[in-house]
Structures are given as C-alpha cells and as structure tokens.
Amino acid sequence: MSGGPAVAGRRTGPAGLLLVAAAAAWVWVVARGGDMPAVPGTMGLGPLPFLAVWTLMTAAMMLPATAPVAALYARTLTAHRASHMAVFTLAYLLVWAAAGLPAYALAAGLGRAANLPVAAGTAVAAAVFALSGVYQLTPLKDRCLARCRSPIGLMLRYASYPGTSRDLRAGAHHGAFCLGCCWSLMVLLAAFGVMNLWAMVVLAAVITVEKLAPAGRVVARAVGVTSIALAVAVFWVPDLAPGLTGGGMTGM
C-alpha cells in the first residue's frame, strides 16, 4: 500500500499553515513575475537576488507536496508540534536554497547559449530535455520518489535522531531526497525560462501528482518520456524552449 496518498488524506492544521505559506509564495511570484526581466539565464540577477527568487520559487512549488510529510513528522512528536514542523520545513527549504548555487551557475552558463545562433541554443535545449527525461526513468529517481511517497520508514529513522538538532537533521535529510527526486523537473526551467509562470505552475502540479497521487510513479515515467520527445521536437519547434532559444519570453 502506498503511503503517499494516505499521508495526503491525513492533513492536519499545521499542514494547512504550510499550504498558506506556499500560497503566499505563489502570490509573490505571480506579482513580481511580471516585473522580472524577460531574458534567458539568470534574468539579469546577481547571485544573492537570484538565490532569493529561487528560494521563493521552490517554496511555492515544493511546499504543497511536502506539507503532508511535514505534518506527519510533527505528529510523531508529543509537544510543540507546530514549532518542530517549522524548523523541519526551514531545514528542508535550506537544502533547496543551497541548490540555488549550482542552479545559478547552470542558468548563467545556459544563458550564454541564448546569445548563440538559434541552432546552438536549440541543441543545448535538446540536451536539457534529454537529461531531464533520462533521469526521470532511472532507478535513482524511483528510489527518491519512493521515499517521498511512502515516508513512514523515514519517520522511524528521524525518531532515532537525538538532541535538539533532530528537526534540522530530519528536514535536511528529507530535503535531500526531495532534491534527488525533483531536480530533473526543476532543470527544465532553464529551457522554459526561469520565471516562466506557466511552466512553474505545470511543473509544480507534476511534482505534487508524482508525490501524492496513486499513479504518481506512472506520471513520473510519462513525464520522462515526454521530455525525451521534446528533446527531439525542439529541433523543429525551437520556441518549445524559449529560455534557451529566445522565443516567446513571457511569463503568465
């Protein structure tokens, strides 16, 4: 029996707080998205502003699928559940914030591809789609996704963590598995445009379905096959990757 859907069905009040936080992050992203420069790569941002935007983006996209797990973690404790869950979630987001450093380097490098001839940018886009698609079909993706979908085993592990650092360790550990599960989807933003709001909405929905829906593993594989198909199709339709070919650089 899959633990993901069962966990989703047992959401508690504290989980609702994380959903409110995710909604607030989405409001910020949508409100500020129109003000961001519609350019490929890092959107003209330096490292620190990029990390701030990246962290808010990941909070908006990841927290809806993570809220049930954070609530389950809180229910393993006997007191101060909301504060423990807050620290767990903060550590989780710190993992994604740290992932913003290689994301910035990748975006900066790929941004240069958009200044090359369209054919070169298209080839880079095909490589990004292919990389994402192939990883979606690997055993490592399956392993990380299984831990996110059925976290009961993780809860037992976290219960053994001693001391006051338990919440930080547990949140960081789960964040690492989530990163292993979802980086292949986030890297697609390099092709679609980092602040392409439609792409963010679709990818956030995919992440949530992968982790919580009964057919999540099937969806993950379908997304992998689709991404590989896009790696081929982008040679005929470069605008499929506006973040690398410069076509249609708009948000929502």
Image (tube, rainbow, N blue to C red):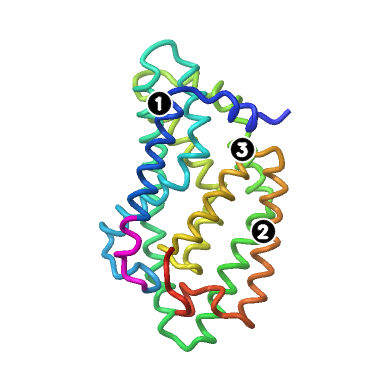
Horizontal side, residue 19 vs residue 220: left or right: left
Which amino acid is tagged 1? Met
Tell me what residue is drawn at x 37 percent, y 21 percent: 82
Viewer-proximal residue among 230 and 20: 20
Viewer-proximal residue among 107 and 205: 205
> Considering only order in the chain, which callout, 2 or 3, is on the residue closer to the N terminus?
3
Horizontal side, residue 116 vs residue 140: left or right: left
Q: Which residue is mark 1?
A: 85
Task: For mark 1, give the secondary structure.
Answer: helix
Q: Are marks 1 and 3 in contact (CB under 8 Å)?
A: no
Q: Are marks 2 and 1 in contact (CB under 8 Å)?
A: no
Task: For mark 2, give the secondary structure.
Answer: helix
Q: Where does residue 34 sit, x and y in percent of width and height?
A: 34, 64
Q: Tell me the CA gap for discs 3 and 2.
A: 18 Å
Q: Where does residue 112 sit, x and y in percent of width and height?
A: 40, 78
> The magenta stretch spans which residues?
31-38
34 in magenta: yes
Viewer-proximal residue among 124 and 15: 15
- Between disc 3 and disc 2, the foreground one is 3
Q: Which residue is mark 3?
A: 212
> Considering only order in the chain, which callout, 1 or 2, is on the residue closer to the N terminus?
1
Q: Main secondary structure of the magenta part?
A: loop
Q: Where does residue 101 sit, x and y in percent of width and height?
A: 36, 56
Quarter of the figure that contains the C terminus? bottom left
Q: Where does residue 75 sit, x and y in percent of width and height?
A: 49, 18
Question: Which disc is residue 224 wearing?
Answer: 2
Which amino acid is tagged 3? Leu
Horizontal side, residue 228 vs residue 246: left or right: right
> Considering only order in the chain, which callout, 3 or 1, is on the residue closer to the N terminus?
1
Q: Tell me the CA gap for discs 1 and 3.
A: 19 Å
Tell me what residue is drawn at x 48 percent, y 63 percent: 189
The image quarter containing residue 208 is: top right
